Image: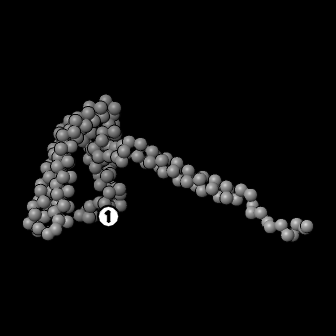
Amino acid sequence: MTSDNVPAKPAAGRGLRIALMASLALNVLIIGGIATTLLCFGGKGHHRRGDGLMGFVETLPPERADVIGAKLKSDREALRPLRQAQREARGGARSALTAEPFDAAAFKAALDKAADAGYAEKKARMSMLADMAAALTPDERQQLHHWFEQRRHRFKHGGPKDGGDDDDDDDAAPPPPPPPQE
């Protein structure tokens, strides 16, 4: 018998190589996703360090940052029930919108309740800001102003949130640098 009549065997291990490559690709995706999450979010939930006014507090000297930051954290705790009320009111508005039969008056009342809850939360945040500003030195208030201007400018020009204010002049100059710290 000659070897011409023997059927050719498929390449040994070809299926195994494909499985190993698929496994490697899957591992790279999973590890890449975990690494991205840790790098972007610091492994502490969805909020980045320095969000909101705490971002400004981190620019202060450590002894001042500790004092102002502690006050800000305690004030933020007072906002929790207001934010919860706002979420619940918005949920009520969504429920009224999808209710059958649709009741326009109930939907309007739910929207009014959501707007009132949003106003109460915003008013509390503004009061918190005023209290924080009162505790700052004049130089720190200038720094706070500069910090707000940087954020406003960044958001206005396609920053992290919604693209910024439309009521400002697009040709406005960037904010001045902060005053030197002593």
- Which amino acid is tagged 1? Asp
Q: Residue at x 17, y 46 (%)?
A: 82
Examine the rendered structure and indicate whether residue 37 appears above or below residue 10: above
Image position, residue 54 (x, y; %) = 30, 41
**Percent x, y of residue 14:** 70, 59
Q: Is residue 145 left or right of residue 96?
A: right
Position of residue 29 measured from the top left corner of the image (x, y, whole percent): 53, 53
Quadrant of the rendered structure where residue 65 is?
top left
Tell whether 52 sits left or right of 103. right
Q: Is residue 126 visible?
A: no
Outermost residue toward the top in this view: 63
Residue nearest the observer in this picture, 41 or 89: 89
- Which residue is at 40% across, 46% downward? 41
Q: How many discs mark residues in the rendered view? A: 1
- Between 115 and 102, which is closer to the camera in this rendering? 102
Helix, strand or loop under label 1: loop
Q: Quadrant of the C terminus?
A: top left
In the rendered image, the quadrant that contains the N terminus is bottom right
Residue under the point 29% across and 32% down:
66
Report the residue at 22% width, 39% height from top.
77
Looking at this view, name the residue that lies furthest to the front. 1
Residue 177 is at least partly visible in this image:
yes
Residue assigned mark 1: 171
